[in-house]
Image (cartoon, rainbow, N blue to C red):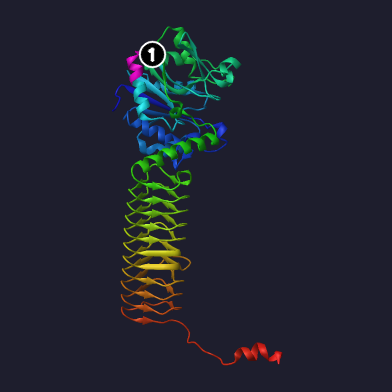
């Protein structure tokens, strides 16, 4: 459901000092996706317009990541706190007769359902300012909610809190809803008389109470509003999201042998009865069909895999397409822009790069196939190499249907092997081979009788 009477401000200007990184905090990735994208995607489920992102540290980098979302950007320079961030936003929002949803870009567990319920709560309570709160056993680092007779009267930040206040377990989630005109009025009253000499948005709570405005608290489960301040937080929240993804897949019919050691990203699709073995990574926009066998120790990235495919352990597949009933591995590497057609087989220690492997074709072991267009039912013997690079350019190899390539063959591209052609083992082929021909390109064998006796054994007599 879209909420029409709201504007959203997402705070994403800070460096994230405690992350100990040169990467802007909101661009640190969780299962392959920057944390702020999780926030934006949930917000966009309920707000389709008037979403503003406040950027500052490495702003161009952040904007570049987010350009696909059709957002409005506001610059905060320098970064002097959350209150200062909102000060920069006021000129952009003051003419809107709407309420303002404010949240941080480092809350990847937030959901559209919680945000929607919060905005409804704000309207139902006829609040001037609403705050999302939660209880944590260890709320270190978070602002504490200070209540009097059950009503919120102020928020105190960790660094400004007294010892008794630090014992309070109700914390500020960093999600707010203001009436736009009241937000402008209150923000202009904030001072930087704080331990950090920054302008805190949380000071608006005390200012609102002093003006007898209606301040309401909306309590949620703490799991959904956890923020990220350190790389330890990053790892902990990634684990939460990873488990959720795996649970959803298993509920849809995927068999995951060891969820504790399996990593599957959010946009991956997997069909029913596919079995995923331990230590397997499936990332990007990969799509796997039904009744497949994957792993263990496989890496699959941005790859489409059909039904009834078997990928044995320690295989690595990137940006390729695998058709139905293919068998791959173990220890097989398929590099980008490759297509492996139905019933093909690629065995151990085979590498394929930017090639088409035709239906029913096979390379069972120890081969390199690069820049190759291979037909159907081709046999690639062990140790075969397509020599596709001359030091300056890549060249193409074409192998037509039903060709047989003997073991330890080098095909020096550009070259074409005709249908039903037969290449003798140990050949270095530098010219096209016509259909049905036998090609041999190796020196004639010479046996020199008793050569070893004369060379090595004469002194033993």
Query: Is-magenta flag for residue 319?
Result: no
Q: Quadrant of the C terminus?
A: bottom right
Numbered-mark total: 1
Q: Residue at x 32, y 15 (%)?
A: 124
Q: Position of residue 30 (x, y in %)?
A: 46, 39
Crowd class of label 1 (few under 14; some 14 to 19; many from 20; radius 10 Å)? many
Q: Return the residue at label 1.
A: 128
Q: Secondary structure at mark 1?
A: loop
Q: Quadrant of residue 310?
A: bottom left
Q: From what the image shows, is residue 191 above or below residue 107?
A: above
327 and 435: which is toward the camera: 327
380 and 391: which is toward the camera: 380
Can residue 194 be seen in this snapshot?
A: no
Q: Quadrant of residue 306?
A: bottom left
Q: Position of residue 448 (x, y in %)?
A: 56, 91
Q: Position of residue 442 (x, y in %)?
A: 46, 82
Q: From what the image shows, is residue 368 above or below residue 419?
A: above
144 and 57: which is toward the camera: 144
Q: Residue at x 37, y 32 (%)?
A: 42
Q: Position of residue 66 (x, y in %)?
A: 40, 37
Q: Which residues are magenta?
A: 120-128
Instruction: Indicate left or right for 42 with 297 as reference.
Output: left
């Amino acid at each position: 459901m879209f909420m029409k009477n709201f504007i959203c401000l997402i705070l994403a200007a800070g460096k994230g000092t405690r992350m100990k990184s040169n990467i802007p905090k909101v661009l640190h990735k969780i299962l392959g996706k920057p944390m702020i994208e999780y926030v934006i995607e949930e917000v966009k489920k309920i707000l389709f317009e008037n979403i503003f992102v406040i950027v500052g540290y490495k702003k161009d980098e952040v904007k570049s990541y987010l350009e696909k979302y059709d957002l409005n950007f506001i610059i905060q320079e320098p970064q002097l706190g959350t209150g200062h961030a909102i000060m920069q936003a006021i000129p952009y929002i003051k003419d809107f007769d709407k309420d303002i949803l404010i949240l941080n870009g480092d809350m990847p567990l937030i959901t559209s359902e919680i945000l929607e319920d919060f905005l409804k709560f704000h309207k139902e309570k006829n609040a001037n300012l609403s705050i999302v709160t939660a209880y944590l056993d260890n709320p270190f680092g978070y602002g504490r909610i200070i209540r009097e007779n059950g009503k919120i009267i102020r928020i105190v930040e960790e660094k400004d809190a007294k010892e008794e206040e630090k014992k309070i377990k109700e914390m500020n989630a960093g999600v707010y809803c203001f009436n736009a005109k009241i937000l402008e009025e209150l923000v202009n009253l904030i001072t930087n008389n704080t331990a950090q000499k920054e302008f805190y948005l949380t000071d608006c709570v005390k200012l609102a109470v002093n003006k007898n405005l209606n301040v309401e608290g909306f309590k949620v489960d703490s799991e959904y509003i956890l923020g990220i301040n350190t790389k330890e937080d990053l790892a902990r929240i990634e684990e939460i999201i990873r488990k959720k993804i795996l649970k959803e897949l298993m509920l849809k019919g995927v068999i995951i042998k060891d969820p504790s050691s399996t990593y599957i990203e959010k946009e991956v699709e997997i069909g029913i009865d596919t079995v995923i073995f331990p230590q397997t990574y499936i990332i990007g926009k990969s799509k796997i069909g039904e009744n497949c066998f994957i792993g263990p120790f496989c890496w699959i990235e941005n790859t489409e895999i059909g039904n009834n495919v078997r990928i044995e352990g320690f295989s690595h597949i990137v940006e390729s397409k695998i058709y139905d009933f293919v068998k791959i591995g173990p220890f097989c590497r398929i590099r980008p822009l490759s297509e492996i057609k139905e019933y093909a087989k690629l065995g151990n220690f085979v590498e394929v790069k930017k090639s088409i492997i035709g239906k029913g074709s096979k390379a069972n072991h120890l081969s390199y196939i690069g820049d190759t267009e291979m037909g159907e039912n081709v046999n690639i013997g062990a140790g075969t190499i397509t020599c596709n690079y001359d030091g300056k350019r890549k060249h193409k190899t074409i192998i037509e249907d039903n060709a047989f390539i003997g073991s330890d063959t080098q095909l020096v591209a550009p070259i074409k092997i005709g249908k039903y052609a037969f290449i003798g083992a140990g050949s270095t082929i530098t010219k096209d081979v016509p259909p049905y021909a036998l090609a041999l390109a190796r020196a004639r064998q010479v046996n020199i009788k008793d050569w070893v006796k004369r060379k090595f054994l004469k002194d033993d007599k």
